Amino acid sequence: MSNAHRLLVVDDDPSLRDTLTEQLALSDAFEVVTAETARGAMDRVAAERVDLVVMDVGLPDLDGREAVRQMRQGGFRGPVIMLTGQVSDSDTVQGLDAGANDYVTKPFKFAVLLARIRAQLRQYEASEDAVFQIGPYTFRPGAKLLVGERGSKLKLTEKETAILRFLYRAGRQVVGRDTLLAEVWGYNAQVTTHTLETHIYRLRQKIEPNPATASILVTEGGGYKLLP
């Protein structure tokens, strides 16, 4: 499940929680973890990588909107979709003001929630707040930065950032050299595969434990891919 989006489902209804987990886990694009309480959700977000939160409003220990507010204050930047049985405008406004990105009203069709999740993840990945995990590094494309496990920081060029972003989105799929050139440089006749190979070489010098035997950014089948 390389590069799968890690979703946190927060609901005290075990039936709904299990159903959502089972349905979302059918897609290789998602890895699902759960919490039954607001405190459990805040603890998971603080301790683990979470890409998106599906948060019920009516939790037993704390209003879901207040939990979102505290998560935002704690630094969580990923999308949050609130689940609510209430349909009033004031309820929606309160949730959005607390830091939620979207609202889905119960009862809902799973396909609708799934579409909202995908839309929020697309928007997030294009934003300055996006954070991804690449090998031992936290990748912050908006800041053109890789942060190591011990807090070391590797500054990336614009092209290096674009290469990593595109390869990350491809998951375990091999991306051909011509495709990567077109995506990163555009269709510029003066740019050759040698230019790409030079950038790949420099990237490996930065990120690989042993650049001579790449284990993160590998060459395969006439192209490149990232390994987790």
Image (spheres, helix red, strand yellow):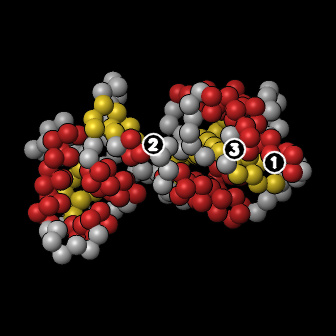
Disc 3 is placed on an element classified as loop
User: x, y percentage for residue 128?
Assistant: 47, 46
Classify 209 as above or below 86. Answer: above
Q: Please tell me which residue is depicted at 70% across the width and 51% down the height of the picture.
A: 102
Query: What residue did someone put label 3 on?
Result: 100
Residue 131, numbered label? 2
> Dot 3, how many residues are within 10 Å of its Cα: few (below 14), some (14-19), or many (20+)?
many
Which quarter of the figure has residue 41? top right
Q: Between disc 2 and disc 3, whose residue precedes?
A: 3
Q: Between disc 2 and disc 1, whose residue precedes?
A: 1
Looking at numbered disc 2 in the image, what kind of residue is underneath it?
A: Val
Rounded to the nearest angstrom, the CA distance separating label 2 from label 1 is 27 Å
Q: Nearer the viewer, residue 64 or 127?
A: 127
| Whether residue 17 can be seen here | no
> Dot 2, how many residues are within 10 Å of its Cα: few (below 14), some (14-19), or many (20+)?
many
Q: Please tell me which residue is depicted at 74% across the width and 40% down the height of the picture.
A: 97
Disc 2 is placed on an element classified as loop
User: x, y percentage for residue 210?
Assistant: 14, 38
Classify 119 as above or below 2. Answer: below
Classify 123 as above or below 9. Answer: below
Rounded to the nearest angstrom, the CA distance separating label 1 from label 3 is 9 Å
Query: What residue did someone put label 1 on?
Result: 92
Rounded to the nearest angstrom, the CA distance separating label 2 from label 3 is 18 Å
